[in-house]
Image (cartoon, helix red, strand yellow):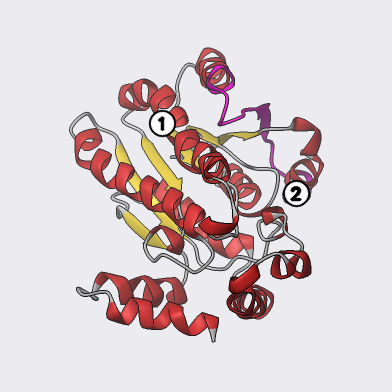
Amino acid sequence: MTDKVVLITGTSSGIGLAAAVASARAGMRTVATLRDTGRADALRKAAETAGVELDIRRLDVTDAASVAAAVDSVVADYGRLDAVVNNAGAGHVGTIENETVDDVRQVMEVNFFGVVQVTKAALPHLRASGGRLITVTSVGGVIGQPFNEAYCASKFAVEGFMESLAPVAARVGVTVSVVEPGAVASEFVANVGIDAAEAVGAAGPYAPSLQAYITRTTGQFSSGAQTPDQAAEPILEALTAERPAFRIQTSQWARGFNGTKLTDLDGSATLGLTSAWLD
């Protein structure tokens, strides 16, 4: 993949930022995109510190015109597109009785339809280059998690979309992979945008369970999380490996966690595991 052209979405922070720097360091021409280029300071600083060059451009995955313009401009400027990393996404915590259907739709718009739009725009160019399509999902795309109904639904949808697309894309020379992180110490958690005390206070009969969930999850992200650089390493491997796997976990914990579901035919082990988070 040296000197290949790679487009990555959602690079303002976290895994996306780390993946952009890592791919540039590996010699790839890296187009690092984000919804608001005014938030690119951390990205520029990371690139400067690493001594690499990034091509920073605007791309809003929820705006079809923005997606098309970004992809078309990359191909116009470089003459090719060899890989896309769908990383942009949004967290969400809530349960359906206490939120609106529009809240759920918004999560799907960013996390699922955003991926669909970028994929559709990129596929003709990836087909021409025999390229790679890599999508960052989550362990929440394999195991449903309490108070993550909308988020997990969106990631389940992405996993189903990509698992269905993979054999079809392979027939025209495009390799499809999904990368499944667990807890990552990044701004992603802050970007969920909830005030814990306020959320618990408004949760009604769900308040004790939500408090238990927040306490457990905050502890996991503060003490057991990977760094963004660690979580980005498998993305670089998917970009550079001769034959990358379809499903790639970013840590041993993520492999074990997802393994619970993939060997649990009746669902009892999985629900037993996640139900304990609410005790």
* Residue 59 on the magenta segment: yes
Is residue 241 toward the left or the right of residue 112 in the image?
left
Q: Nearer the viewer, residue 73 or 258?
A: 258
Residue 35 in the image: x percent, y percent? 67, 33
Report if the CB atoms under discs 2 and 1 are less than 8 Å apart: no
Quadrant of residue 165 within the rendered picture? top left
Neighbour class for label 2 at 10 Å: few (<14), some, many (≥20)? some
Residue 156 in the image: x percent, y percent? 38, 53
Neighbour class for label 1 at 10 Å: few (<14), some, many (≥20)? many
Residue 121 in the image: x percent, y percent? 43, 22
**Residue at mark 1:** 119
Q: Which quadrant is home to the N terminus?
A: top left
Is residue 45 toward the left or the right of residue 78 in the image?
right
Is residue 87 at all visible to an observer of this figure? no
Q: Nearer the viewer, mark 2 or mark 1?
A: 1
x 54%, y 61%: residue: 231
Provide the secondary structure element on which disc 2 rests.
helix
Is residue 97 toward the left or the right of residue 267 in the image?
right
Residue range (magenta)? 48-67
x 64%, y 73%: residue: 221
**Residue at mark 2:** 46
Provide the secondary structure element on which disc 1 rests.
helix
At label 2, the amino acid type is Ala
Is tag 2's residue or tag 1's residue first in the polypeptide sequence?
A: 2
Quadrant of residue 80 within the rendered picture? top left
Is residue 153 at all visible to an observer of this figure? yes
